[in-house]
Amino acid sequence: MAKAARGLPSSFALNLPDEGPVEIGDFLDEAPPVLHRKPQPAGQEVTERIEPQAFTPQIVPPRAEEERVVAPTRSVQRNAQASKVIRYQLNLTPKSKSMFEELMKHVQTFSPEGDTRTSEVFQGVIGVLHSAMDELDLSELPRRGAWGSVTAKNFPNALGGAFEQAIIKAARKRGIG
């Protein structure tokens, strides 16, 4: 099958006026579209379309005092409010995505909770890193560099190493390890 020619067809023309700006009009100036009805097979109900009535503005007289009966308010029982969950988008490389999927599978397989959620694993990781934040030394990290460079590709690994060292130092301070 032959491919169609690229670009606009040869019969295309803009037909712009030579003088003055183009007046394209407004969608409110156009007539409403006409709806065509399809014939209904015998035995089926035919529903009539009700045309909206034209609006005629009127001044409404003020209400009398006896008309201003306030309905009694009733208390509405509400469920306990759900915790405010903040959603984040996480962009992962294919390699880090497969690493995370392996971690999730490992946690779900070997923990007592086989249905551990992604958010729970992230909360655990963030909690450990947050508690080790006082020991986190980022001064020796190399600069990321330009996109696609070796230093840019190595930056996540260097950051992971700094995280690991901070976790080890924090654990030693607490007497673990």
Image (cartoon, rainbow, N blue to C red):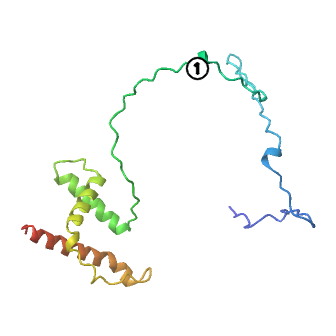
Looking at the image, residue 162 sits to the left or right of residue 40; the answer is: left
Q: Can you tell which quarter of the image residue 83 is in?
A: top left
Instruction: Name the amino acid type tagged 1.
Output: Arg
Compared with 112, 176 (above or below) is below
Residue 136 vs residue 41, the one in the foreground = 136
Quadrant containing the C terminus in the rendered view = bottom left
Q: Which of 64 and 75 is in front in this view?
A: 64
Give the number of callouts: 1
Q: In which quarter of the image is residue 50?
A: top right
Q: Which residue is drawn at 23% across and 69% down?
A: 133
x 44%, y 83%: residue = 146
Residue 12 in percent (x, y) is at 83, 62
Q: Residue furthest right?
A: 19
The N terminus - image quarter: bottom right
Nearest to the observer: residue 171 or residue 110: 171
Looking at the image, residue 146 lies above or below residue 8: below
Quarter of the view holding residue 18: bottom right
Residue identified by numbered label 1: 68
Estimate how packed mark 1 is, as few (under 14), some (14 to 19) or many (20 or more) residues with alpha carbons within 10 Å. few
Q: Position of residue 106 (x, y in %)?
A: 21, 57
- Residue 124 percent across, percent down from the top left: 23, 58
Is residue 90 rendered to the left or right of residue 45? left
Q: What x and y, as percent, mark residue 88?
A: 39, 58
Could you tell me which residue is drawn at 28 percent across and 82 percent down? Answer: 139
